[in-house]
Amino acid sequence: MGSALATAHAQLATAAEILGYDEGLHRMLATPRREIHVAVPLRRDSGETVLFHGFRVQHNVSLGPGKGGLRYHPSVDVDEVRALAMWMTWKCAVVHLPYGGAKGGVAIDPRGYSLAELERVTRRYTSEIMPMIGPDTDIMAPDMGTDAQTMAWVMDTYSVNRGYTIPAVVTGKPLAIGGSLGRGTATSAGIVHVTKAALAESGVPLDEVSVAIQGFGKVGSHAAEIFAARGARVAAVSDQYGGIRADDGLDVPRLLEHVRRTGSVVDFPDADSVSNTELLALDVDVLVPAAIEGVLDETTAGDVKARWVVEGANGPTTAAGDALLAKNDVTVVPDVLANAGGVVVSYFEWVQANQTYWWTEQEIADKLEHRMTTAYAEVSALAKREGLSLRDAALVIGVKRVAEAHQIRGLYP
């Protein structure tokens, strides 16, 4: 069992125990409803044919159609996709979305392939999993290694095969073909909203804290930008090539320009270099792990000096890491709440596509902030009332909503 799936199962087991669920219900909640493993052959630009493996998992659809990203990464396997689909189930339930959890992936390093090759991979993968997806059954979105262009190819492939344009089959599309304003920065904006809410409980304003962000991709870079714009001091950031720190705060607009020009945060002037592991242990107020799974584990979590860890990535903290952070009184705002902003605005995009009526950027920003702060307040209130961590409280809320829907609907046949 992969470490991400082991972590997801351990979290569910804790929630099921708190809720007093029997073995049958626990097993039903732990097991994906449907999964598909497809071969994805690619004719390369050179004429050579290579083969990739693709997956799509629908973990639970008791609350509505499956919803989840499509990931292109060389290490993608079915266990990782199962874990991510399970987290999506709880995430959608925590923020009151009428969705179940799903996830997809192709085991490919997109950096090694041309745009034309990636288009062929995407279209072939889409056509292979087509029986499982649709605007009322399973709606894809971008994830690690994929973007708005990938979603445009998925939508077009699906639509061409159905004979008419179906924008609601994916979210995170370009605006020109039915995307939503605010979608590109939604996950990052959600992280900042819940960080502000968590800080407020301790009477700490956002503009008085220092922040370190591991991961400077779609989520981390926009989060840095929003944190800096709101007055927080972004003291360190890192990407897959390395990291940088400046204790008096990085000039984020200049850093974004540097990354656009060079492709990495490394060698940014007026900053010292720092490794990805060292970044986790920096003396900052807020740590945002926004890269990959499992970075805060038994070897790294004990060194965290931040008072708040706000999970931008999915599953960045292992069960052992959680125990160490709790022992050191670090408040962890869990991924199923902290990074739910992306799926919230994906939901808004899906609603807009279904009614073919689009909202303004301000309407979307206001609705997102309301949804995130309300969800945080619900999770925090349960945590205080029952003496739980924020993670256990969020999982209890998410798991309970899914289980209740399942029980009310009944078992067929």
Image (spheres, grey):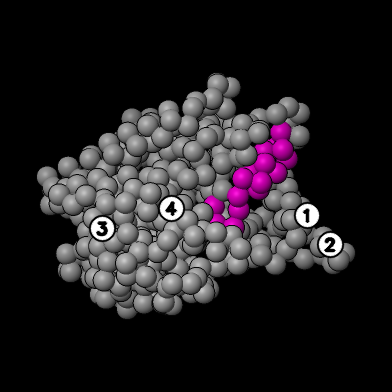
Residue 114 visible, this orientation: yes
Q: Position of residue 134 (x, y in %)?
A: 61, 35
Q: Residue at x 54, y 52 (%)?
A: 143
Q: Amino acid at mark 4?
A: Glu
Q: Nearer the viewer, residue 286 or 210?
A: 210
Q: Tell which tag, 2 or 4, sits nearer the viewer.
A: 4
Of all residues shown, which one is farthest toward the right?
47
Task: Characterize the local packing of mark 1: few (<14), some (14-19) or many (20 or more) Cα atoms within 10 angstroms.
Answer: few
- Residue at which label 4 appears: 225
Instruction: Say whether disc 2 or disc 4 marks the residue closer to the N-terminus.
Output: 2
Residue matched to label 1: 116
Contact (Cβ within 8 Å) of mark 2 with mark 1? yes
Element class at badge 3: loop
Q: Residue 209 bears which disc, if any?
A: 3
Write the start and end of the magenta stretch as one range: 143-159
> Would you name the residue on which mark 2 appears?
45
Residue drawn where x is 43% and y is 52% of the image: 225
Q: Position of residue 211 (x, y in %)?
A: 32, 61
Q: Are marks 1 and 3 in contact (CB under 8 Å)?
A: no
Left or right? Give the position of 194 relative to 86. Answer: left
- Please report whichever mark, 4 or 3, sits nearer to the chain's N-terminal start: 3
Circle nearer the N terminus (1, 4):
1
Q: Quadrant of residue 116?
A: bottom right
Closer to viewer: mark 3 or mark 2: 3
Residue type, numbered disc 2 = Asp
